[in-house]
Amino acid sequence: MNVIKGRLYNEYHTFIVGSFLFAYKIFNNKVLKKLCTFLCKYPEYLDILKDPVFVRLDSIYQEGMTHYISDELYPQKNNITRYNHSITCSIIIWYICKYNEKKYGNIINDNFTIKLMIIALLHDISHVALSHVIDRVWHEYHAENRKNFIMHHKSLMEILYNLENRGIINIERDILVEFNDFIKGGGKTRLNIDRLAYFLHDWFFAKYFNLKKDTTQVIKFIFNALNSVRLFVGFHNNEPLNELVFTDMTIAERFSEISCKMNKLWTGSISTITYVIAGKIIEALLNQNLLTEKELYVLTDDELIELMKKYYLEEYDKIVNGVNGSFDLIQYNIVIPGKKYSDHDKENVTYTFDELQKKHKYIGEQSRYRLSQPYVWKDDINELHQLNTINMKTITPVCFGLD
């Protein structure tokens, strides 16, 4: 290894070793060494890791507003940021391509692998401060603004142009349009890299088990789950195929059980109420010109929280601490000025926690039902078996990236 590659290797090691899969020993040092050696061929990946627009994600928490709820009310929270999460997604892609598919005799070329890794690395790049709280103010903001966000960041675009000039990516097709069902969307199996990563690392930290007692078993399950994932990207019988599947039905069942638990947590009354009220505070700040849309893409979570506390401290305290340390049967009004509501929408101006719980119970139940559908078993079992019996040689090689 020459001096330049040696320095590059050490830099990659510094960045990657702190990511979830290596920090918690799901993957060992042998895997870490192979990954860093692989990445040495692509300095652009390191450039992205060091670019300020990507580094900002290290101050955007995966959990958004619920990260700030008191420990007494929400002990399941963790410190995973979208920076760490994005790196984790990218590593999972690499592992599937270079370990899992190799077991089936599929040698996926390096350029195709790094392309998928970069797509995964950038999938959350345009998240605003507090992430999905803004869903309560805007609709489809992430999909609509992602392209403009990337294109207006010169340093990031220069890195992408370098990759395009090397023939590794097509910026429009691969990055701006986000062709990646298996990374963020989810196809027939409804499993994707994004979902797989955040379910596993959020479940790891959630207080559903005694961490000191069960860590070994949990790490073993996560490792086995990642080893049972297969990637299908290409065409089969002239039909596009972009799927991520489990090959082990026991793993698939266990993962589905975990997903049900996590969805119940994420769509529970505490989370729902927190997001709704925080969204109203942000909407009021925007309406009163105390906050701009542009600032949402620049501020960190902590900075936006400080702005909320500056102008709506009482409402903020009620969100994160509840009243008398509880969200149950709370009777008080939240009144946030700044917008004139029509008659049919005026219930959004003044409401109680009781009313919110009743109003959003149905939405929460629907969300749990939709999201907790088993990703790769029960209803999809025939689909899964069909995918698992596909002869990989019948998938168009140029699309799949086979040598």
Image: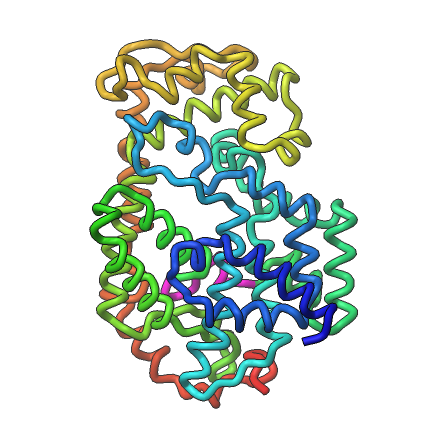
Q: Which is nearer the eye, 122 or 135?
A: 122
Is residue 379 in view from this perspective?
no
Residue 205: quadrant of the picture: top left
Judge whether 125 appears above or below 280 on screen: below
Q: Nearer the viewer, residue 16 or 116?
A: 16
- Counting from the top left corner in percent of width and height, residue 256 is at 26, 58
For the point 62% across and 31% down, the residue is 299
Q: Residue 340 or 287: which is nearer the viewer?
A: 287
* Quadrant in the rendering for residue 13: bottom right
Which quarter of the rendered picture does the C terminus lie within? Answer: bottom right
Magenta span includes 189: yes
Position of residue 106 relative to residue 227, above or below, is below
Q: Residue at x 77, y 62 (%)?
A: 161
Color encoding of the figure: rainbow
Percent coordinates x, y for residue 153 in the rendering: 74, 46
**Picture quarter with the N terminus:** bottom right
Residue range (magenta) = 180-190
Q: Residue at x 32, y 43 (%)?
A: 367
Q: Is residue 280 above or below residue 79?
A: above
Q: For residue 389, what is the image quadrant?
A: bottom left
> Quick check: can you spot residue 11?
yes
Tell me residue 167's x, y (percent): 73, 73
